[in-house]
Amino acid sequence: MLVSFTVYVGAAVAEIAGCFAFWAWLRLGKSPAWLVPGLISLAAFALLLTRIDSDFAGRAYAAYGGVYIASSLTWLWLVEDQTPDRWDLFGGLLCLAGAAVILWGPRAA
């Protein structure tokens, strides 16, 4: 369980950083050179997500969504210096709960 969570967080950081590189280039006027680490980061995201211990990709991706949302709110706070409000936090916790149900809920044999 801890390994899956660590891989999900690593994938989220890689995806957010990669997407932010494109955001910085297109929305913040940064150099196109930002695209190189952005593309590397997005490739790392894809590779990390394949490391999730799940029999089905769709289930792994669905559970990842909750971790991605919580990680995005952490990015908002730590990188963009915007404090998430109570609704951000409640929504993030709700998504993490949903991700846990999808990933670790009992399955019929």
Image (spheres, rainbow, N blue to C red):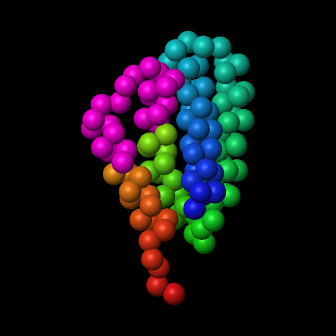
Q: Magenta includes 34?
A: no
Image quadrant in which the N terminus is located: bottom right
> Residue 30, position in %: x, y?
60, 13
Task: Locate residue 19: give its quadrant.
Answer: top right
Q: Is residue 89 magenta?
A: yes
The residue lying furthest to the front in this view is 2
- What residue lies at 53% left-to-right and 57% top-to-bottom? 61
Q: Quick check: 10 left or right of 83?
A: right
Left or right of residue 81: residue 94: left
User: Which residues make up the magenta segment?
Assistant: 72-93
The one of 3 and 58 positioned closer to us in this rendering: 3
Percent across and percent down for residue 97 are 38, 57
Q: Residue furthest left?
A: 87
Residue drawn at 52 percent across, 15 percent down: 28
Q: Is residue 49 above or below residue 91?
A: below
- 5 up-or-down from 79: above or below: below
- The residue nearer to you, when weighing 79 against 61, is 79
